[in-house]
Image: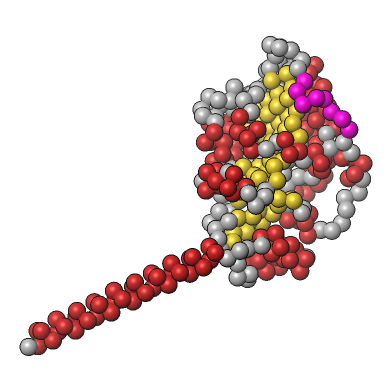
Amino acid sequence: MIFRRKKGIALLIFVVMITLTLSHAQSLEQKSEESSSVLISYDDIISQGLQLNAEEKNLEKWYNSHPLIEFTSLVENTMTIKFIDDSYTLILDISSMLDNKRIPNREAFCTSSPIFSNYTSASTKGYSALLLNPSEYLYGNRHCKKIINRLLYKGYNIAYVSDEDVDLPYIRYNFTAEIVYMNTHAGYWDIDGDQQGDAVVIGTGEYWTNETENIYQFEYENQMIVKGMVGDKSFVCFTPAFIEYYYDPGDLPNSLIYMATCHATYDDSMANAFLESGASAYMGWAQNTVFWTNSRTSVRAFRLFTLGLNVHYVCSLIRYGGFYNFLFRSKLTYFGDNEYRIPTL
């Protein structure tokens, strides 16, 4: 009799536990469905935070207290914001967005003038150089024209593409040149919110719209792209996973990849993706940089390259490139073959 009573009590406890477990699971599922159904005005939330806060730490704290944001992480000069629907927005240059001061003589330095046609050929049998300038609207193209002239003299076939034409499909199919130079914005993506960056991301010239996630659903779901904000504009940024997926080993012809961006060589995440695809050397700035230093040193670097110097000596001679980069502790550095020299006819 006692045995039957204990057996009945145990059965009752088991039933109660199963009921509670199912109820909890249903509650979690319902909460998940409710979160996914919330319409989030990402840009409005980000804009509101920027208007209310004048310091990076205050801004990070404000975003982290927002009910529609899962976490916010500040790594170097990039702020990663993950919303509760698992979408990300990266503010690539948070300092400039908080600083309302205008940079002196910026407009005079960046004024653009007509450049060569979209494709300029120096020789039908020459080496190829791809110059991508997604930020021409900000930085102009004077430095690119100087680089083009020097490479034309060395017999290179030149392709120059700027602003919105530097979109994701273009990058997917056209990095197979001996020289790839890209002047744009870049940052650091903290995917899991541990205050440690996981991957370098590079900005394209393609604007991020409400349709981007659908147009590039495969790339978006596999973390090959992420949304990056620069000022009041949002752009498609590619990650190392994008290069790893679309470029097989040997696709790049022992190339030089020159990313004229902040944080391009902060770690080896983006560098390894290019090197494993066949590039010989990958170079860029280790920390934050300013546009005039970036542009001027790009011209200096290619002058040294066309004189026959290898990538190690070019980076050693340029080092910080200027006073502001010295303050940022940002050097022009590289990964790959330290003896690499650009090929010439």
Query: Would you say 307 lies left or right of 66 here?
Result: right
Query: Would you say 251 lies left or right of 263 here?
Result: left
Find out whether residue 118 is within the magenta segment. Answer: yes
Q: Main secondary structure of the magenta part?
A: loop
14 lies above or below 170: below
User: Residue 242, how many percent across, how many down?
Assistant: 56, 39
Q: Residue furthest left?
A: 1
The magenta segment is 113-120
Quadrant of the drawing holding the C terminus: top right
Query: Would you say 313 lies left or right of 278 here?
Result: right
User: Residue 210, how many percent across, how many down?
Assistant: 65, 52
Residue at image coords 84%, 37%: 140
Find out whether residue 288 is within the magenta segment. Answer: no
Looking at the rendered structure, the number of numbered marks drawn on it comes to 0
Residue 269 occupies which quadrant of the picture? top right
Residue at image coords 68%, 25%: 179
Answer yes or no: is residue 274 visible. yes
Residue 37 occupies which quadrant of the picture? bottom right
Residue 163 occupies which quadrant of the picture? top right
User: Residue 336, how many percent across, how many down?
Assistant: 59, 30
Query: Would you say 228 lies left or right of 272 here?
Result: right
